[in-house]
Structure formats: C-alpha cells, structure tokens
Image (cartoon, rainbow, N blue to C red):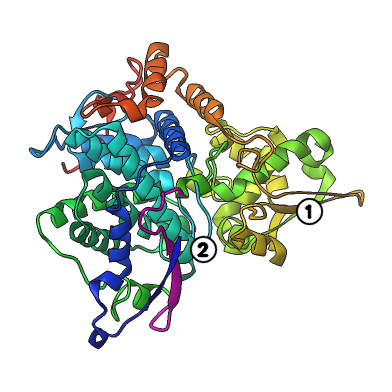
Amino acid sequence: MKLHNVRVHRSEENLSREDQLAHKIARVATDPVPVDADVTDMIINRIIDNSSVAVASLNRAPIVAARAQALTHSPSSGGAGATVFGIQEKVSPEWAAWANGVAVRELDYHDTFLAADYSHPGDNIPPLLAVAQHVGASGAQLLRGIATGYEVQVDLVKSICLHEHKIDHVAHLGPSAAAGIGTLLDLDTETVFQAVGQALHTTTATRQSRKGEISTWKAHAPAFAGKMAIEAADRAMRGQTSPVPIYEGEDGVIAWMLDGPDASYEVPLPEPGESKRAILDTYTKEHSAEYQAQAWIDLARKLNGEHPEATDPANVASIVIHTSHHTHYVIGSGANDPQKYSPTASRETLDHSIPYIFTVALQDGRWHHVDSYAPERATREDTVALWHKVTTEEDAEWTRRYHSLDITEKAFGGRVVITLTDGRVIEDQIAVADAHPLGARPFAREQYIGKFRSLAEGLVEPAEIERFLSTVQRLPELAAGELDQLNIQAAPGVVDLAAAPKGLF
C-alpha cells in the first residue's frame, strides 16, 4: 500500500489530473491484478450475506416501495436488464440496484467497516451485480469489480472522516461503486476518473438521515449512491465530464464539506500490481442492529445467563456503558436524541439506540431481527423502566482502540457497570463481537450459509435455497450471461406485487 497525500489546491496551482485522488482511484480500478483465492471466498460469503438480509426484507415497506418503483422501468436497450430480489421480472440496471440496495440495507444486518468513518461495503454489491447481469458479464468479472469496490471504500474510510462534518457515509460509496463498475466493464482510466468524480459529486448529503427520528431513507441512501454510480458510469462512457478536481479543488468537497482549505489526508491505495484485499478487513453482523451494538448484544446475552437479577428494573439502580467516542455520540446517550429512549420510536431509530438494544438483549438473552423491534416489545413496561436507567460515557482507552490501525487491538465494545439497588456492582467488558474475525465465534462459510438458511426459511422454497447456495459457491466458474442465477425467487404467495403503493412512475 502507498499513502497518498490529499490536500486542497488553489485553482492557479493547476493540480495535474494524475495527482488527483479521483484519478489515483481510477488507476486502482484499471489495474488488472488477479483476485486472490481468500478474497474470492470472502466475496462469495458476502454475496450470500447480502442475499440473506435481502430475502428477510422482501415485505418490509421500504423494499415494497423501491421494488414497485423499479418495476416501472423496463430493461434499457443497452443490455439484458437486471434481476430484482424475490421476483422473476427484469428491470433497467440502475433501478435493480435501487431496489436491491434498499433490500440489502433495510435490516442493518450486513457487513461493516469502521475506521476514520463508517461504512457498509456490501452496499457495493447490488449496483455491481446489476451492471454485471445487464451486460452479460462472467463470475470472474464480477469478482474483480467487487474486489475494487471494497478496496476503494475501505481505503477512503480508513483515511477521510465524513461524519465529523455531518456528511453521510455514502459519500465514500458513490466513488467506490463507480470504481468497481469501471473494473467490471474494463473501462479506461480516464472514463473511470470521470465516473468517480460524478459519483462523489452526486452523493454528498448530510447525516440527518441518521439523526433524531431516523426515517426509511436510511435504507434508501446507499441504494441511491449505487444508482448514482451506475448513472455516472453511463455518462462518463458517453464522454461526459465531472467537476475537476472534485476532492482537492478550492470549491471542492474537502474545502467546503470536510476539513476545509488547510486539510491534509493520507489515503492508502494499492500499488500497481498489488492485490486488492480490503474486503478481508471488514466484518459482518450476527445481529440485525448497528455494528457498534454487535458486541454489546453478545455481552448482554452473556450477562442474562450469569446475572438474571440484572434483568429486573426493580433490582437495578443504573447501567453505565463505557465505550468509544463513536458509540457514545452516535448510538448512545451522547447523541442527545430523546428518540433513543422513546418506546414509540421507529425501528430505524431503535437499531441506533444502544440503551434500547442492550436492555432488550439483557432481558431476553437473545436478539431477533423482527421480534426485538416489535412495538409490543419496545413498549413493555419493565423494559422501558430498565431502558431509562442505561446511559453511555466516552472512555478514552476504548476510543483509542476503536481508531487503532492494529487489527489485533482494534475494538468496538467497552465496559459495562451495572449498579444494583442493594449496592452490589456487576462489571464486565467485551472488545469485539462474537462473530468478528477475532471474536469468540468468528463467521466462516458455515455461518454465512446458516444465516441465509435461517432468514430464507418460509420465504424461499427449499429447492431454491439449495440451488442458490450451490450456484453462488461456483461464482468464479459462472460463464458470461449466467449471473442471473444469483437472483433468488421467493416462494409462491410471499411477494404480492399488486399490494405495492402507487406513485408517480
């Protein structure tokens, strides 16, 4: 890896194209380096993972709406079209990316990477798969595109903080998906450069989508970025250009949206000929909740068995979670969002409330992607009473470990102190989730397949489950035009297209 200094340049400095970050990203995308075997295996795992959570979301309102929108846009003349999760109909690729991107993101249940900023790199897969299906690409081409998408997004997340300036993290997804599309289609560096710039320019939005009463747009935001990346690639292929320099310009993203005119970043990118391995730095979720809640669910489940007395609010004086800056201020009491303590808050808000999540996991000794968020669960009197005794505090050491570049000490947990009304104190801590590569039960192919089977049960017929799992594990062997086989058909009666809401299209 090579570190690239990125700073704001005045217009009269005439920063050369080759020295611009977007161009360096494009050169990574057009480097024909092979995909390593362990990277291939992990990409297959993440396609299974995405499919798991997309199937589980098939009848949730945001997916129903996005799917209905997509179905009004028939395949364009430039290719065969792309599939939409759960059904047989094909649509234009940017709209397939839209519908499938919402399905993948809705439950907050797929992979994550956290460093200087936040990300869900699996959000690269829906737009890349849609384009691959549309143009009749092979499994090997899709693998190369996905490896690039993960690499670019992870490298940007390692180095450029968006959330500090209240910019939503999908601003790193637009460029990464555009770069991945460039790799997939074997575009030239100049075309990818223009696509990356346009994708960034159109996907910078505020973090209000993840603040206060969190809305259904949370699931749509990455899908929109993927859709924009496809459209940006299409325009760039037709010779259309983007704002230059998009990152470093005196009126560019860094100068006015991020650290300002005096900013300086060190962005790591692979050297020419170096494998794209960033996907191996990422981790998926065992539980349907914000990633920073994963370890806390595991610790709460453990405490449920060891200290059942702590599940009764009558026995508890206070619960204080000592954790990182990010966890405290984004999903903890440091966010100062009263909605995080509201029994009538939306599901999107509850899955970004560590006080709620820890309380329910502590009381139930489990976590379920539907039951744990049900209104009757959130409004239970003893839950509300215990929930309101949970607060978070930033701990400098856990913040340091959160930002550590040493994977062996990087942590997303913390320490909990439960003070009982009789004066006893229960303390425990956890560094990473059980499913993390360094956790108690790291996810491997067996766990990804188990997650898929569990979430697909009752929604997909057994024969279709087996067909999909067999196909996806042969991804490197799939020939040109065979990627439609990565779609999943819902069982008869599961999806009712006639019940979709009406809109403009």
| Boundaries of the magenta span | 259-277
Mark before the other along the chain sequence, 2 or 1: 2
Residue 181 left/right relative to 209: left
Residue 282 left/right relative to 318: left
Q: Which of label 2 and label 1 is nearer to you?
A: 2
Observer able to see residue 47:
yes
Residue 317 left/right relative to 260: right
Which quadrant would residue 287 be assigned to in this image? top right
Q: Principal SS element in the magenta part?
A: loop
- Give the secondary structure at mark 1: strand
Amino acid bearing label 1: Ser
Observer able to see residue 381:
no
Task: Count neighbours of disc 1 (C-alpha within 10 A) and say few if under 14, some if 14 to 19, many if 20 or more.
Answer: many
Above or below, 398 relative to 492: below
Q: Which residue is mark 1?
A: 318
Task: Count neighbours of disc 2 (C-alpha within 10 A) and say few if under 14, some if 14 to 19, many if 20 or more.
Answer: many
In depth, the one of 286 and 411 nearer the eye is 411
Amino acid bearing label 2: Ala
Looking at the image, the residue that sits furthest to the left is: 77
Residue in the image at 69% along x and 50% along y: 431
Q: Which residue is mark 2?
A: 116
- Give the secondary structure at mark 2: loop
